[in-house]
Amino acid sequence: MLNDLKTKDYIEEAINLKTYPLNENDKIILTYSKETGLRRLVAKGVKKTKSKLASYIELLTANKLFCKKGRTLDIISQASSIESFKNIRKDVVKLIFSMYLSEIIINFGVEKDPNSSEVYNLFYNALAKIASSRTKIELYLAIIRFQLKIMEISGFALNFYCCTNCGKLIEKEDIFYFSYNQNGIICNNCKITNLSKTMVINRKIVKFLDTLKKSEFDENTYYDKMANEKLCKNCFLFLYKYIEFYSSRNFKTIQTLEEIL
Ligand SMILES: [Zn+2]
């Protein structure tokens, strides 16, 4: 009997990504949970004005969810707030960028994800950094770090160190090519025989991204100090295209993003 109870009720830490109407009173909420990855849960009665649960299903908030097993989808019975990231909702630019991050999580996240706690922590730290950022550069740096790290966790780590094809160090050359299929830079020689999608990439961007890739959210590298808005924007757009190349679904936030870049 005790074991039975244990398997029926459980607690998860999760960040809300999206909601859908289920019926007149209830909603389905798509969350990313630290324990299991992408999850669809039922939030009962949240469309009613007096619902206690309603504030916990707000998008881009982190909550502790007390769940019970349902027939098809599990049901949230109670919740408590971990972090509301309220500064994100006070600033439209922060909000749109955060929605873009949540789209990446939806597109690359999976159910029963073995990397769920790593992805959750990355998402949580990125949202915290976005919420506390005071300048557009700080905001960009948080997003770029997230873009680099989420691709690494998803198995599409970017290589900026040597030619991805032949291993040659290409530090002294001015022109770099980036191969989408090979996930990294390639040298002039390899470019001639490479038929996959490539683009010319500026040396400054290569150095900048290589440093950011190896650093943490709270680190203040030489390149953090050197960053300007134009460089950050170019890096963001470069990574945006790379992520889009590997995404099975189109991003809906791009049009809105283009208006605020
Ligand atoms: Zn090469």
Image (tube, rainbow, N blue to C red):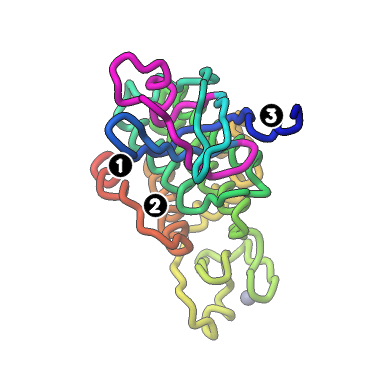
Q: Is residue 2 visible?
A: yes
Quadrant of the image containing the N terminus: top right
Residue 15 at what x, y percent from top left?
50, 32
Residue 56 at what x, y percent from top left?
44, 22
Specify whether 139 is left or right of 211.
Answer: left
**Residue 37 or residue 241, whichever sits in front:** 37
Nearest to N terminus: mark 1 or mark 3: 3
Q: Are marks 2 and 1 in contact (CB under 8 Å)?
A: yes
Residue 208 at what x, y percent from top left?
54, 47
What is the CA distance from the residue labelled 2 to the residue labelled 1? 10 Å
Badge 2 amino acid? Leu
Q: Nearer the viewer, mark 1 or mark 3?
A: 3
Query: Mark number for residue 261?
Result: 1
- Does 50 appear above or below 132? above
Specify whether 249 is left or right of 121.
Answer: left
Ligand 1 placement by image quarter: bottom right
Q: Residue at x 44, y 62 (%)?
A: 248
Q: Residue 199's image quarter?
A: bottom left
The stretch in magenta equals: 34-63
**Residue 222 or residue 93, whichever sits in front:** 93
Residue at which label 3 appears:
5
At mark 2, the secondary structure is: helix
Q: Residue 51's image quarter?
A: top left
Badge 1 amino acid? Leu
- The residue lying furthest to the bottom in this view is 193
